[in-house]
Image (cartoon, rainbow, N blue to C red):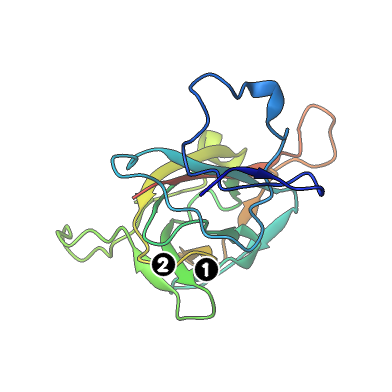
């Protein structure tokens, strides 16, 4: 087919890859590419590449009590919308928490929900010790420094089995021994400038399949 330059400024008859090598430079390209509504397929061999990074900041100050059973502490929820089907998600939890009872035990389980589905516990240890239950934090008692607060970090590489555009919700279900409260983002003292109110964060790094 002959190459034709039309009066509208368009070119017809040019085959894919028909431009000479080096004839298009960076300054000839658009500064941005709108991929809204389009599906981008990565070439083979790109597994492990970071597709997207997002952060959730939790600034609320909240308390949670659950006498004898694991229940959801909704203030600790965090969500992420996936970019690619079948990818993995590296999640970095970084929470500031305290326990207001010097003798009250507490433990926490991690749950994940896909869109409006049922939340399921993840990172379950099948090898329990004695009469314990699986949890990602074995015990969080309020004695000593813990009553003032501790920054709890937890890193997972999750493989949810989702499709692109699904919303992943990560929940923390706490069990407290009796009347002790788990406090988010603050410690035992609140009336003195020596004590601070903190921010908790959750970082999401989506990794190509």
> In this rendering, would 133 be left or right of 203?
left
Kind of element beneath mark 2: loop
Horizontal and vertical percent for residue 140? 45, 49
> In this rendering, would 112 be left or right of 44?
right
Residue at 34% in and 57% down? 159
| Residue 99: mark | none
Q: 16 or 169: nearer the eye?
A: 16
Q: Is residue 116 visible?
A: yes
Horizontal and vertical percent for residue 150? 55, 37
From what the image shows, is residue 66 above or below residue 35?
below
Q: Quadrant of residue 195?
A: top right
Q: Residue furthest bottom?
A: 117
Residue at 52% in and 68% down? 166
Q: Is residue 93 visible?
A: no
Q: 156 or 40: nearer the eye?
A: 40
> In this rendering, would 143 be left or right of 156?
right
Horizontal and vertical percent for residue 121? 36, 68
**How dense is the environment of label 2, judged by Cα within 10 Å: few (below 14), some, or many (20 and up)?**
some
For mark 2, what is the residue? 162
For mark 1, what is the residue? 166
Q: 127 or 91: nearer the eye?
A: 91
Horizontal and vertical percent for residue 158? 37, 54
Kind of element beneath mark 1: loop
From what the image shows, is residue 128 above or below residue 116?
above
> In this rendering, would 125 be left or right of 99?
left
Find out whether the residues at labels 2 and 1 contact each other: C-beta distance under 8 Å: yes
From what the image shows, is residue 132 above or below residue 95?
below
Instruction: Quote the CA–CA distance across marks 2 and 1.
Output: 6 Å
Q: 180 or 7: nearer the eye?
A: 7
Q: Quadrant of residue 188?
A: top right
Residue at 42% in and 61% down? 110
């Amino acid at each position: 087919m002959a190459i034709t330059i039309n009066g509208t400024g368009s070119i017809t008859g040019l085959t894919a890859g028909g431009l000479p090598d080096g004839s298009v430079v960076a300054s000839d390209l658009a500064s941005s590419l709108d991929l809204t509504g389009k599906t981008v397929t990565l070439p083979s061999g790109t597994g492990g590449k970071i597709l997207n990074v997002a952060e959730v900041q939790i600034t609320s100050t909240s308390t949670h009590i659950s006498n004898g059973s694991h229940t959801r502490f909704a203030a600790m929820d965090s969500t992420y919308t996936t970019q690619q089907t079948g990818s993995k998600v590296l999640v970095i939890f970084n929470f500031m928490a305290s326990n207001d009872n010097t003798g009250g035990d507490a433990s926490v389980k991690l749950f994940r929900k896909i869109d409006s589905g049922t939340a399921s516990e993840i990172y379950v240890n099948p090898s329990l010790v004695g009469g314990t239950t699986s949890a990602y934090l074995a015990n969080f008692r309020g004695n000593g420094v813990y009553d003032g607060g501790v920054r709890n970090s937890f890193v997972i590489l999750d493989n949810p089995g989702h499709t692109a555009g699904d919303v992943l919700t990560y929940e923390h279900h706490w069990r407290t021994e009796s009347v002790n409260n788990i406090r988010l983002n603050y410690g035992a003292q609140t009336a003195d400038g020596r004590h601070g109110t903190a921010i908790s964060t959750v970082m999401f790094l989506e990794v190509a399949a």
